[in-house]
Amino acid sequence: MKLSRREFSRLGAMGFAAQMLPAARLEAQDANRRIGYCVIGLGRIADHFIGGVQASSTSKITGLVSGHRDKAEKFAARLGVPKSSIYSYEDMDRMRDNKSIDAVYVALPNSMHAEYTIRSAKAGKHVFCEKPMSTSVSDAEDMIAACKTANVKLMIAYRLQYEPTNLRAIELIRQGALGKVQVIEGANGFYETAGEWRLNKPMSGGGPMLDVGIYCLNATRYLTGEEPESFTASVSTIDHDGRFDTVEENMVWTTKFPSGIVASCSTSYGANLKSYYRVTGSKGWLEVGSYGYQGIRLQANYRSERGTPPTVLDEPNTERDPKQFTRETDHFTQCILENKTPKTPGEEGLRDMQCMQRIYKAAGMVAL
Amino acid sequence: MKLSRREFSRLGAMGFAAQMLPAARLEAQDANRRIGYCVIGLGRIADHFIGGVQASSTSKITGLVSGHRDKAEKFAARLGVPKSSIYSYEDMDRMRDNKSIDAVYVALPNSMHAEYTIRSAKAGKHVFCEKPMSTSVSDAEDMIAACKTANVKLMIAYRLQYEPTNLRAIELIRQGALGKVQVIEGANGFYETAGEWRLNKPMSGGGPMLDVGIYCLNATRYLTGEEPESFTASVSTIDHDGRFDTVEENMVWTTKFPSGIVASCSTSYGANLKSYYRVTGSKGWLEVGSYGYQGIRLQANYRSERGTPPTVLDEPNTERDPKQFTRETDHFTQCILENKTPKTPGEEGLRDMQCMQRIYKAAGMVAL
């Protein structure tokens, strides 16, 4: 039985009960059932997601939303999506009648996450939304409320919270391998070129903090398992070449957690920062390199007692893109099928939005 | 002519004129003249300094100040220092009459730097003082004033400002190899064990910020060539085992420089942090590992134009301890002989003290 009672009830309430088979037959049939995703926005990250779904045995692409019909039709032909399951942004609400679509994947510029999450929820679809969840705390709250009202699930695509090397890092910390963690350092940033939507605040909601700094922020939260007590931050723009007319160029911040663990993090659109986090405790350290789609690697050096030989780890994750996308999608699919709350629900995205609001405020900027 | 006119005058004013030879003979004789240093405090760092002086062709150890006469006599025997040039803390002011002592090296716990710098200045000796310069801004100001009044030189032992790999890093940045520098990250910290004077605020003046964090702070200043515009900071103590009853355990801070360069730095006595700084600009990065007495290494990766092959550097400094001490001592000796201002005078130490006062304030602590 892949569909839970609650899920079954929901489908019933939405008028599908008549189409549903008796439970026993449903169970048999559902062993091969895949959850159908409609991709909203066919940009670069959608390619990774689609690749991830194609490699999945639990999910499939069953719909597309795009402003470019031609582009969507090419995707559809390649993916075996019927033309009738291609929507424009204007008419995508019609997908409520498309029973092949169970969920949407929101791969739009940040500022559109809220609208399309809410419209998808109202269309009765579960929502898998890219990070950052939104461009404001209130939008994030509205998204959660809309999904609750529609009784659909909402998951934010924090793919690294499903990635084995990051899970291994968390496990080592929880086991006490590093002793008492004291300091976390992290950075993520890249040189962004003129003309990208990320540099347009009405679309992006903010600069590198929202786009890539969020990985450091989220990591400090999942590595500690704590919610930040306080933040401090400094923001700057060095290049006055038009790229940073609406968003910040650099942000550095510190975080203090209730246990006393402190973090110092950096993000930038003005330079290709080393992409990593490093956790140092009384017994040693671990470092995970890259927040990327592949090439993640854990290095560590710790010792159980002073004077004893250290444990030295160097563990590259050799998985290749789009494995991370497959894994997070499989998780959401499983949550839908088993009526469980995703590990990274809307509330997780909201917490990051609240944190980033506090970081921007600490830097003396207008809050999100 | 190694002694400048001003230096010669000073010696004359101090009553040595009768002993001085005519200028021409002095010059010939002084080609072999070494500046004599009296070491105040025979702790661990004094060993490194003494080794540095022994390897120097410009300087020599000519006096010792210690609270342990036996220990001092062993040092004296080894170094060829006459017993008459051994002083206690109480009677060290007598060194004003010891013409073999040109300068002192203050290697005491931080809180004693001010008193012994001022007493040494009053005894007519140049002062080479370890970092941190003092435990308060006002002490630093008093030290500078005392040395000015006594017309003696004051240098703070910022050995890395004389170290070739750090100078190379500065040169690469000034040449624009990294493009526009955006972000500097740095950390320095170690696990400090119970009972060390560093953990006793009345002796140390503060925790890891003053002792090892200062290296990151000073590096951000010499790497940028700018004075910080603002700081933010978070401080914490995790271990309540008595070690941190008077000083902080962890400090993370951000700095913003007038150009917009931002820095995020970490220091700790609760964990062996990676000891490094990393500078990232629009064209690439450089990283210098270790603030230690040896084993410093520069790595860099930058490209003049996008799409061109990068310049990749990996330059270990193979010099061994106590070379850094020889080099900084030679510099101070040269300043004394040529009547020049040291590259890292008291004012440089004062600036760091002022910065650290601002960092402590930013962290909500009582200022220095």
Image (cartoon, coloured by chain):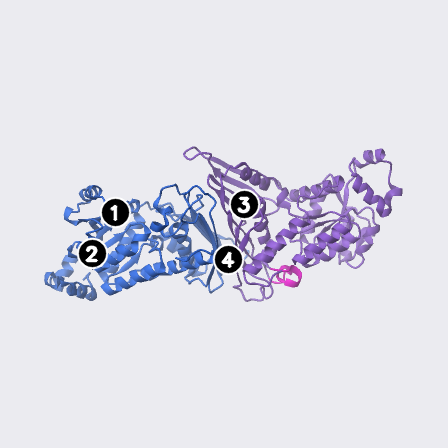
Chain colours: A blue, B purple
- Image side of residue A98 versus residue B210, left or right: left
Residue at mark 2 shares a chain with residue at mark 3 = no
Q: CA distance from mark 3 to mark 1?
A: 42 Å
Q: Which residue corresponds to mark 1?
A: A50
Q: Amino acid at mark 4?
A: Lys
Q: Which residue corresponds to mark 3?
A: B289
Chain identifier of the residue bearing label 3 in the image: B
Chain identifier of the residue bearing label 4 in the image: A
Tags 3 and 4 touching, CB below 8 Å: no
Q: CA distance from mark 1 to mark 2?
A: 15 Å
Q: Nearer the viewer, mark 2 or mark 3?
A: 2
Label 1: element kind:
helix
Q: Nearer the viewer, residue B145 or B334?
A: B145
Label 3: element kind:
strand
Q: Which residue corresponds to mark 2?
A: A102
Q: Nearer the viewer, residue B356 or A309?
A: B356
Q: CA distance from mark 2 to mark 3?
A: 52 Å
- The stretch of residues the image draws in magenta is B194-206
